[in-house]
Image: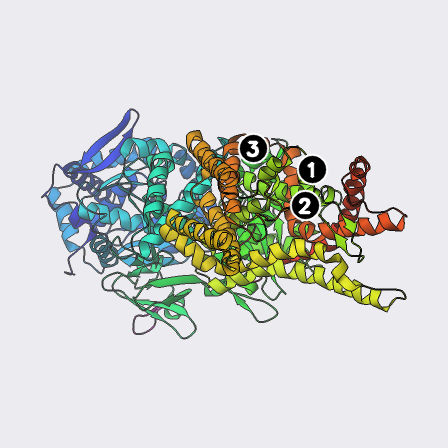
């Protein structure tokens, strides 16, 4: 870089006089400021500063919000070799005093009278501060008038004397700890960073590029973008009125924006809240998942046809509106200052706005690395800018070197020597890694590493960033240094809390302080924490939390102007809250402090259930449990055979037209449909987390195997005890029907879980093609089994049918059948019904879908093609009733029992036949005889088979449900929660 190169040179180039450089707000809208006019304004104001006696190297402070006048003042000071010292407009009088004293500023430009009053309160302590100019009082206009007497040659002479290594600005770091330090940045620092960014982001800084700057210009991030825009001729508008930012974006229609991650988190959270308020929360959640998957698929090649079609649909319904909220032309955004989060990065790219994360510090003139349109790795902060070298020290600290690195801190040589090595390496204080392609990933700050008493080193950033994306959560501070586990302090988001209060029926006037101990709110937050805990390591999981009475704000000193948490200040002021988190050992499961069914537990279960769940699917699962339980309790004609064993024939044929009821009440296909639906969701989450397939299978099997092992163990123990008692004992075989009913289903379903990695991949690639192949194999197996009489073909068909039903559950989820037009839903139902009629009337299949007395053949065992067709028919029925059922399930009295039953579904299914057998034992011990025929007296006994087993089952659930609840907890990173 030539030694005379300086920032103001770009203003006076003279080769683009008509180019519109700025859009400046006026009372009536926006006016254009051309390059020629800006050069004239800068020259005039520079002359005014000369007239006021500002000398080369003099420090002049700028106190105000982001505005055209700020940029104008910056360039005017740079033109005459002065040094600008930015101060955040939200700074307190004490903070202002420190900056002005330490920099020894001789003058200050303030924006408003409020800023001036803050200065007047402390001016007695600032003997070097000689002049104060107030923008909204017209002082800059008067300065320009006074400068009219200064010859142009004097301004040009001063500009020509400025060298590249002269100080351009001293930026005081907002600092999450201690007093701010003044970072000295030269003209060369800022110019090199701006030019490197332009070269790396040439697709963004192209023809017709424009942006709206709303971040504070006191921060180096916004400052260097300002320089890049002026350097390259990119159209720039300023606004500090964030309440009107959507209006400004709509009016100006920028092509790119820049913001800190918290802004992108808020945009996403607000979109979710608006969708939920309009009863479109499920639609938004689905659109979000498609956007994330579409972005992820793009990294591995080209998204599949089905995913592309879904993306196009949601682009019309959702994504286009989100882009319109940013003005409609934004395709790229630049983010820095903190990690954005991988899922959020994929979400934005999926909706058509690629957020390019970069990394840098004030000490590196802003950016040192950045993702570019042609080289993006979401989750990283990109590759080094031209001229920048990145190195990872042995302890993981990120080191930087290059022309963007500052020369040192203002008059603070000891700290400069601690930060800068003799050979120019900057010790950033951040921890990170470099991959083989040169992409940098930042893990967090060294000073923020939490070391538990067990010696585990935890970087809290990932956990905190993920939790902050939840609509209810504003800020999170993880704690646990020299403590036994990680806990957290949480503050509530104002808008998210308002939406939650409406949905939960809480008083609108209730404050965070009043709600911080509300059990419904705590349960909702616990759900969010559980979901995030499933994505981090065991040591990083948050085991306890406390809700603070108010938000952490900049005004109270808990946030920096760039919205970073001042962790030390928070830990100091809320030390009592932190101590309270560790006074007693945490419960194993905060959410389940009492077993389901005890007073108050049901409301907590409902509150803890994510609103994004498909309630119709949950209702289908619960209804299946109820139907199969009542069916097994009431319809079998259970009696003793001559050998003394139990027989349980089904007398449905004795009821005129009873076989037709089995087309709805044979509920086993619905079990597998729901299982496929849930397994697809869990597999997609596993893929998103890039977890091993074996982990998914193990976690799913654990949910089934542990409750089943307990159930089998209790039966075995009971049988062994019975065998030691006097009298005849026939072992468990006399109760064999009671065992067979739950076990055959669980065995088949467990085998299907093992196949999920393969079957889900086949469905993702081929969709309906996989179902068609399975249907063909089932048809062939039925012909060979029923027609030719090949036993192996009949048993192979059994496996294929349940695999088909499970695969059909994938389609239920991915095709969103419940939201399809009614004609399509009717078509699916009609096709299933018509095929069932053909099979039972013309192809000789039994009419009943359950095994009945005297049947030579059963559709259910071994399972044949009729059950596969029944699954299609029942899926059509579920799709048909979805709109009505979804509305009904939003009524608390309907939804609560569905939630409660789903939480203990496996327990009820395992133990319902045990409850039935205990009822039989009671019945016989009372001296009654089990009838072998469905007589009128037999039907009159049915009340017993509903009431007594129900009471017994409730007792069994109260005892054994804890096992199922326990295994629902994710044990390893990436486990699926809530499916």
Residue displayed at 76% across by 50% down: 915
Q: Which element is circle 3 on?
A: helix
N-terminal of the pair, mark 3 or mark 1, is 1
Residue nearer the viewer, 53 or 321: 321
Q: Which residue is mark 1?
A: 654
Which quadrant holds the N terminus?
A: bottom left
Residue 757 is inside the magenta segment: no
Q: Nearer the viewer, mark 2 or mark 3?
A: 2
Q: Position of residue 543 (x, y in %)?
A: 61, 57
Q: Position of residue 17 (x, y in %)?
A: 11, 39
Residue displayed at 14% across by 38% down: 19
Q: Which residue is mark 2?
A: 853
Q: Residues within 10 Å of mark 1 (few under 14, many from 20)?
A: few
Q: Position of residue 796 (x, y in %)?
A: 50, 58
Residue 343 is left or right of residue 642, and the answer is left
N-terminal of the pair, mark 2 or mark 3, is 2
Q: Nearer the viewer, mark 3 or mark 1?
A: 1
Pointers 2 and 1 in contact (C-beta within 8 Å): yes
**Residue at mark 3 to residue at mark 1: CA–CA distance:** 33 Å
Q: Main secondary structure of the magenta part?
A: loop
Residue 542 is left or right of residue 813, and the answer is right
N-terminal of the pair, mark 2 or mark 1, is 1
Q: Which residues are magenta?
A: 419-426
**Residue at mark 2 to residue at mark 1: CA–CA distance:** 9 Å
Residue nearer the viewer, 916 or 248: 916
Q: Which element is circle 2 on?
A: loop
Q: Which residue is mark 3?
A: 885
Q: Is residue 886 visible?
A: yes
């Amino acid at each position: 870089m030539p030694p005379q190169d300086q920032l103001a040179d770009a203003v006076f180039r003279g080769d683009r006089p008509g180019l519109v450089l700025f859009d400046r707000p006026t009372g009536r809208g926006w006016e254009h400021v051309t390059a020629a006019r800006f050069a004239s304004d800068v020259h005039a104001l520079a002359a005014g500063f000369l007239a006021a006696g500002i000398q080369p190297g003099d420090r002049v402070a700028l106190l105000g919000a982001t505005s055209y006048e700020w940029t104008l003042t910056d360039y005017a000071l740079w033109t005459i070799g002065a040094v600008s010292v930015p101060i955040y407009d939200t700074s307190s009088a004490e903070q202002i005093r420190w900056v002005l004293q330490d920099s020894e500023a001789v003058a200050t430009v303030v924006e408003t009278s409020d800023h001036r009053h803050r200065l007047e309160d402390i001016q007695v302590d600032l003997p070097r501060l000689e002049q104060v100019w107030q923008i909204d009082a017209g002082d800059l206009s008067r300065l320009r008038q006074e400068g009219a007497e200064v010859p142009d040659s004097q301004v040009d002479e001063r500009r020509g004397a400025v060298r590249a290594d002269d100080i351009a600005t001293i930026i005081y770091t907002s600092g999450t700890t201690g007093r701010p330090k003044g970072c000295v940045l030269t003209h060369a620092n800022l110019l090199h960073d701006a030019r490197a960014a332009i070269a790396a982001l040439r697709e963004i800084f192209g023809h017709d590029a424009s942006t709206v700057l709303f971040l504070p210009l006191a921060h180096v991030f916004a400052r260097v973008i300002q320089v890049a825009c002026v350097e390259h001729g990119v159209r720039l508008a300023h606004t500090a009125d964030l309440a009107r930012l959507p209006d400004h974006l709509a009016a100006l229609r920028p092509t790119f924006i820049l913001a800190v991650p918290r802004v992108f988190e808020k945009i996403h959270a607000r979109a979710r809240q608006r969708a939920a308020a309009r009863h479109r929360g499920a639609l938004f959640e689905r659109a979000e998942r498609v956007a994330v998957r579409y972005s992820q698929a793009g990294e591995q090649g080209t998204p599949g046809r089905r995913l592309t079609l879904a993306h196009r649909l949601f682009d019309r319904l959702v994504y286009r509106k989100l882009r319109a909220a940013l003005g409609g032309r934004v395709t790229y955004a630049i983010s820095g200052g903190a990690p954005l989060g991988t899922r959020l990065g994929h979400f934005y790219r999926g909706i058509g706005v690629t957020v390019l994360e970069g990394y840098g510090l004030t000490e590196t003139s802003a950016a040192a690395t950045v993702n570019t349109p042609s080289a993006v790795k979401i989750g990283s902060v990109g590759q080094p800018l031209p001229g920048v070298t990145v190195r990872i020290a042995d302890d993981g600290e990120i080191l930087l070197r290059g022309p963007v690195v500052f020369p040192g801190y203002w008059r603070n040589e000891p700290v400069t020597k601690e930060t800068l090595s003799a050979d120019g390496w900057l010790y950033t204080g951040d921890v990170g890694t470099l991959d083989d392609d040169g992409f940098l990933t930042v893990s967090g700050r060294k000073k923020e590493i939490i070391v538990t008493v067990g010696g585990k080193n935890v970087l809290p950033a990932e956990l905190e960033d993920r939790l902050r994306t939840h609509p209810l959560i504003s800020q999170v501070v993880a704690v646990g240094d020299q403590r036994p586990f990680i806990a957290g302090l949480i503050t509530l988001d104002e808008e998210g809390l308002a939406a939650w209060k409406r949905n939960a029926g809480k008083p609108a006037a209730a404050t965070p302080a009043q709600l911080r101990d509300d059990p419904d709110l705590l349960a909702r937050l616990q759900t969010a924490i559980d979901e995030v805990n499933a994505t981090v390591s065991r040591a990083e999981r948050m085991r306890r939390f406390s809700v603070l009475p108010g938000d952490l704000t900049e005004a109270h000193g808990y946030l920096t102007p760039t919205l970073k948490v001042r962790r030390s200040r928070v830990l100091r002021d809320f030390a009592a809250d932190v101590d309270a988190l560790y006074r007693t050992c945490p419960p194993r499961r905060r959410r389940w402090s009492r077993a389901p069914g005890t007073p108050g537990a049901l409301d907590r279960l409902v509150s803890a259930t994510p609103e994004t769940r498909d309630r119709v699917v949950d209702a289908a699962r619960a209804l299946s449990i109820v139907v199969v339980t009542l069916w097994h309790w009431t319809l079998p004609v259970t009696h003793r055979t001559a050998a003394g064993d139990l027989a349980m024939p089904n007398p449905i044929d004795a009821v005129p037209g009873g076989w037709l009821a089995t087309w709805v009440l044979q509920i086993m296909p619905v079990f597998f449909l729901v299982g496929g639906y849930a397994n697809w969701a869990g597999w997609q989450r596993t893929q998103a987390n890039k977890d091993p397939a074996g982990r998914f299978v193990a976690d799913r099997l654990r949910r089934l195997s542990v409750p089943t092992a307990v159930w089998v163990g209790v039966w075995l123990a009971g049988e062994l005890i019975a065998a030691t008692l006097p009298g005849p004992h026939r072992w468990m075989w006399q109760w064999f029907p009671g065992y067979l009913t739950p076990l055959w289903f669980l065995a088949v379903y467990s085998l299907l879980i093992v196949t999920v990695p393969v079957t889900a991949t086949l469905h993702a690639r081929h969709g309906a093609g996989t179902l068609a192949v399975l249907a063909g194999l089932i048809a062939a197996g039925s012909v060979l089994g029923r027609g030719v009489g090949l036993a192996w073909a009949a048993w192979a068909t059994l496996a294929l049918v349940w695999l088909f039903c499970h695969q059909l559950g994938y389609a239920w989820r991915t095709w969103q059948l419940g939201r399809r037009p009614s004609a399509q839903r009717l078509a699916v139902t009609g096709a299933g019904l018509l095929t069932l009629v053909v099979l039972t009337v013309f192809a000789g299949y039994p009419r009943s879908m359950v095994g009945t007395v005297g049947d030579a053949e059963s559709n259910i065992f071994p399972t044949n093609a009729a059950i596969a067709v029944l699954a299609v028919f029942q899926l059509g029925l579920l799709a048909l009733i979805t709109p009505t059922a979804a509305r009904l399930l939003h009524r608390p009295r309907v939804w609560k029992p569905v939630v409660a039953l789903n939480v203990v579904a496996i327990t009820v299914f395992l133990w319902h036949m045990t409850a039935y057998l205990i009822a039989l034992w009671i019945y016989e011990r009372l001296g009654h005889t089990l009838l072998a025929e469905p007589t009128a007296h037999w039907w009159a006994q049915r009340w017993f088979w509903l009431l007594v087993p129900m009471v017994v089952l409730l007792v069994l659930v109260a005892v054994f449900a804890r096992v199922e609840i326990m295994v629902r907890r994710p044990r390893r990173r990436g486990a699926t929660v809530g499916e």
